[in-house]
Amino acid sequence: MAEEIKRSWYKEMSVYQVWPRSFADGNGDGIGDLKGVLEKLDYIKSLGVDAIWFSPLYKSPQKDFGYDIADYRDIQPEYGTLDDFKAVLKGAHDRGMRVIMDLVVNHTSDQHEWFKKSIEDPTSPYHDYYFWRKGKGGRRPNNWMSTFAGPAWEYNEKLDEYYLHLFAVEQPDLNHDNPRVREEVKDIMRFWLDMGVDGFREDVITFISKKEGLPSSPYYFPIGTGIENYMHGPHLDEYLLEYRHEVLDKYDCMTVGEAPMMTTKKALHHIAEGPDQQLNMMFHFEHMGADCLFYSWLKTKFNLKKLKKVYTRWQKDLYGKAWNALYIENHDQPRIINRYGSLKYRVESAKMLATMYICQSGTPFIYQGQEIGMLNMPLDDINDYVDVSTLNNYKVAKALLGEKKAMELVHYASRDNARTPVQWSNEKNAGFTTADKPWFFVNPNYTEINVASQENDPDSILNYYRRLLKFRKENDIVIYGSYEEYCKNSDELFVYGRFLDDKKMLVVNSFSENNVAFKAPEGFDLDKGKLMLSNYNNCGIVNNGFALRPYETRVYLFD
């Protein structure tokens, strides 16, 4: 084992993300729930994952589908009860899987008791749980804009004050500068950790410290104006270390932060291993910008060189210092095949994309439906969409670009694309529910793309994910090896090597619908390597190279 790498269970695990509303409906009301999860635990285990990350299950008005929390210590009734959650927790643990909860403490719901009390009595301690401010000359306290579009301040007539919300109007920001708020957060952590939860994914955690005085920004953007005043704020390090030393260090648990506009330099500040480490891993968004500027609504042409530069930077900069979190899909991103893959070569590109990211150094996260190659589902009417950020961004796009272009962006970029019910079978409603109507539209391609049709097909995307995760688990080089990129100037191939002790591995990925010639880099003799994974049969070698077929991937291992 390379001396610079420290072993940990969270580094060796792979994680399956459940967005509960669309995973599986166990009681027949059309909404995914914990009973449905309990029934599918054997399926999740069969993938070869070691943990489940639940998007928020807490009691919520569902304005942002659980990321607006009304009670941190109870379960949303549509999903079940605390006893149902404990049954799922026990079921996961009995199967050798850990459970990670979403910790959403930058903001609450406006229906949380704290916020209600902050309005009822401006002299109560709860008023200072949030950012309440008077207006300035009939205007809002500053010029900040919500990341969901629109002003970041909402006026309350009763108090003649505004409250800050960096996301939806119904998601007021918590004031972590208030020690009482930090104690509440620590108590929430202890509540779930004492129950047996194994860690947290911490939502927009780098937003929890705002610059003193909440100054206006000299810059203007339709979305996110003022972000320089609350991203990596002045007390962020202090608060994250407080949460770590006073709570997290006392449990065998892990944390992964989520942070927009994250760079490797900033990430290392938070996740570098050592006494001042604040979090174990960090979700960033840089690799999701290969087809856009910053986020998917600012669409551009897919650029493989851009993607490779990001991946290589994160692999090289963090190696031996901190740990990567790897993902290509989640509840905030459209489906990856529509973005970086090919609808013509859906199966091939799904397998290639899986290999491309899971064979890198880091803990891989797999989002529900990703493992069967689910796709975006464009809807004709904007009124059919339910995601608050989609509706807000659509309004901005329509004003700037017109209706047609705005709907094209909705079809491509909406988070609702990743939130259609999981396609379990070709039965009614894709086997997601026995109800007449599920809570949201089922993609009509479920008759072709579903779990049941792939279970017993050795060449299916599903079974490829199983082989890939098994290969990772059985080979330390995939988890702990160093990384080196090759073919850097190619706009069709993403090729990299992994190295550990006397072993090496070569990962070759094509992002082209055409055949692409490939010759192995110096130091790799393909005739001496063992082909471990491929998405095509008949993988011949000629003169230490081959012609990659459309979206082909190959993994060679060398002893």
Image (cartoon, rainbow, N blue to C red):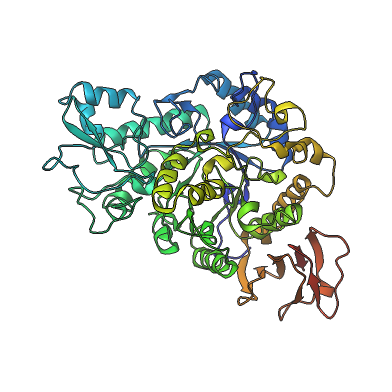
Q: Is residue 61 left or right of residue 480?
A: left
Placement of 172 over or under 559, stated as above or below: above
Q: Position of residue 371 (x, y in %)?
A: 69, 45
Which quarter of the figure is the C terminus placed in? Answer: bottom right
Residue drawn 13% across the image and 43% down it:
136
Residue drawn 19% across the image and 42% down it:
140
Placement of 68 over or under 534, stated as above or below: above
The quadrant where residue 127 appears? top left
Residue drawn 35% across the image and 40% down it:
106
Q: Position of residue 379 (x, y in %)?
A: 59, 39
Placement of 115 over or under 301, stated as above or below: above
Placement of 120 over or under 535, stated as above or below: above
Q: Nearer the viewer, residue 431 or 112?
A: 431
Residue 500 visible here: no
Residue 510 visible here: yes
Q: Is residue 17 left or right of residue 59?
A: right
Badge count? 0
Residue drawn 65% across the image and 55% down it:
358
Q: Position of residue 410 (x, y in %)?
A: 52, 46
Q: Position of residue 1 (x, y in %)?
A: 63, 63
